[in-house]
Amino acid sequence: MTNTEQEESQDNGSGLAFGATVLERLVLAIIDANPIVSADTRQQRLNAAMKALIGKKATPHPLYNDRDDEALLFMARELHKDQCQQNMHAFMNRNNPDADPPPKIRSHKALAEQVEKHFFGSTDPQARYAIVNRLREKFSGTYQRKQGKGLAVDHERTYIYRAVEHGYVAETLEAEGLRRICDELAEWGVKTKL
């Protein structure tokens, strides 16, 4: 794997990709509070700002306030629940050869269909189909790999980790620190939007 692929995967040796750094979240808060008429996307503006600040582009991650990210985390919680139910069934019936078959683990497509109804609720069949396929591909990592990103990342495992094992205390402390920085910047006339 090249250095670029390692940077783009943001892999910490575990095959997991983590979210935005505190600095990236601060830069996004400034970008969001200062819209400009430009063809550049939010990600492109973030990459340009990070390159100017620290000499390299932002790490790849779902951008905050991304509707797909919330849907993907919901899929991860549901998949984790399915896996736990199957494991519990196996444990409870380990000495019972006549036990009912274990509960099935839903496919990425079935989870994406459920999430589409819950989060998007599109009435157009073509839009539903497109949303389900996009979510399914993002969850499996196919979507990112088609763009040459996250090659060493286990996307399914990353979403499950973020959904069920994530350290919310650390995130809360980071958010409080970020809010304080934004308050300090406001005193200097720098607009931010968290």
Image (cartoon, grey):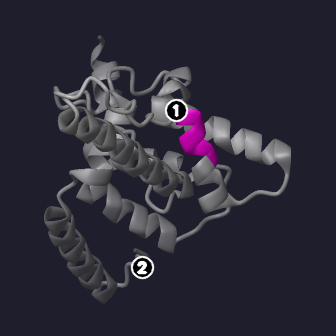
Q: Is residue 113 left or right of residue 88?
A: right
| Residue range corresponding to the magenta coloring | 107-113
* Depicted 9 relative to depicted 30: above or below: above
**Residue 20 visible to the viewer:** no
Give x and y (percent) for residue 9.
33, 29
Q: Secondary structure at mark 1?
A: loop
Which of the 4 quarters of the picture holds residue 11? Answer: top left
Q: Amino acid at mark 2?
A: Lys
Residue 191, labelled with which disc? 2
**Above or below, comparing residue 40 to residue 101 in the picture:** below
| CB atoms of marks 2 and 1 within 8 Å | no
Q: Nearer the viewer, residue 77 or 71?
A: 77
Considering the image in quadrants, where does the C terminus appear?
Answer: bottom left
Q: Is residue 49 left or right of residue 67?
A: left
Looking at marks 2 and 1 on the same chain, the residue that comes earlier in the sequence is marked by 1
**Residue drawn at the location 52% of the way across and 32% of the way down:** 107
- Magenta residues: mostly which secondary structure? helix
Q: Secondary structure at mark 2?
A: loop
Count how many numbered circles sit on residues in the image.
2
Determine which of the numbered discs, if any, sits on residue 23 in the image. Answer: none
In the rendered image, the quadrant that contains the N terminus is top left
Q: Which residue is mark 1?
A: 107
